[in-house]
Image: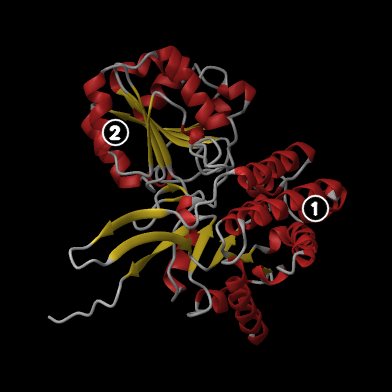
Amino acid sequence: MEQILIDLKSVQAASRQLVSLEDAQIQQVLNEVADLAWKRRADILAANQKDLQRMDPSDPKYDRLLLNDDRLKSILDDIRRVAQLPSPLGQQLEERTLPNGLKLSRMSVPIGVIAVIYESRPNVTFDVFSLCLKTGNACVLKGSRDAKDSNTAIVDIIHEVLRAHRLEGVVYLAPAEREALLPILTAEGLIDCAIPRGSQGLIDFVRKNASIPVIETGAGIVHTYVDGSADLVKARAIVQNAKTRRVSVCNALDCLILHKNLLGALPQLLSGMDKSDQVEVYADEESLEALTGHYSGDLLRPAREEDFGVEWLAYKLSIKVVADMEEALEHIARYSSKHSEAIIAEDQPTIDRFLKQVDAACVYANVSTAFSDGGEFGLGAEIGISTQKLHARGPMGLREMTSYKWVVRGDGQIRTN
């Protein structure tokens, strides 16, 4: 994989061009990419069909891989929105004059070269490109073999536009083979940070094998706690939306935690999910008893220990009944991936305690976790949802893709102590 290191050196050199770009030119490039991609959508969708033909439609990743006219239009609309957002670069984050006359300021700057490692999601190729270009970062894209043809078609279009602006080198699509990953993760001095987006297995591999900085995003083991004070009409709508809106995304509900006082209402909360979406339920002993006879027996299963702490990415849901709020908090602390967690309750002190004590990037009260998304948060798009605490947390938009530097201006001062 010596060629990969040669290519990465070219990306690192090309990244220096981006610092001098005006935002108007960046806007132009992004809009041209969106226009050309829509014009060439038949090529993108044909390539996507090749990828889809290699995957079992029952695989949870199939939906993530799938592109169609509507999805592509939404992706390209996001690129245009990113183009119009204010640039986060060159912002004076802090400014002051010291007693010795030095004028000190902190200015936002690009991170440099960002590598994103992802699985089966060709939309990420567009998202990463647009967010990186808007923030003056070069990008190294390491997609999976599942989406090889889709990613190649997309990057060919991006490169065609970049070539016209003499910027082709700032976007690099690495080989899809797994062997290409380690050279990227160990490219000290060439890549400034790596961002894995995908399964917990992928994230763990990147974290354990990288010698460059890593920002963890992706895996969501999502809980919703329905408290004894909950409004059941709200609860039913929220739980079903969080679970069934789109099961293959990281903000989808994986585990329903239910206060024992509401066991009798459990069939109401899940009403219709066995018929409309065929949701398989892995119920603990108490919830299994409450659902027996009220939920399709073909879809109702007794929960095992290994059915908790799972990111299902499918029409599957585990249920845990708790005696009180304390037990709910303990369950979340044990199994959460610190992505998105929600409470449904009407008692304000209970809500406040949940929002304060739950350790997650996004915490919700009486809202579906489906809103954990950079676009929904008004960020235009996202490069991922960071589940860690250093540098960025939650949806990573433009601001989170910058660093800063200190600028010090003086008039001949020297340090004498």
Circle nearer the N terminus (1, 2): 1
Residue 182 locus on image (x, y percent): 55, 76
Q: Nearer the viewer, residue 304 or 256?
A: 256
Residue 121 appears in the rendering = no
Residue identifier under label 2: 355
The residue sitting at 73% across, 59% down in the picture is 151
CA distance separating discs 1 and 2: 44 Å
Does 72 appear above or below 295? below
Residue 374 locus on image (x, y percent): 52, 42
The residue sitting at 40% across, 36% down in the picture is 223
Does 252 appear above or below 11? above
The residue sitting at 56% across, 64% down in the picture is 137
Sort mark 2 into few (<14), some (14-19) or many (20+) by Cα contacts within 10 Å: some
**Residue type, numbered disc 2:** Leu
**Residue type, numbered disc 1:** Gln
Mark drawn on residue 53 = 1
Assign the C terminus to one quadrant of the image: bottom left
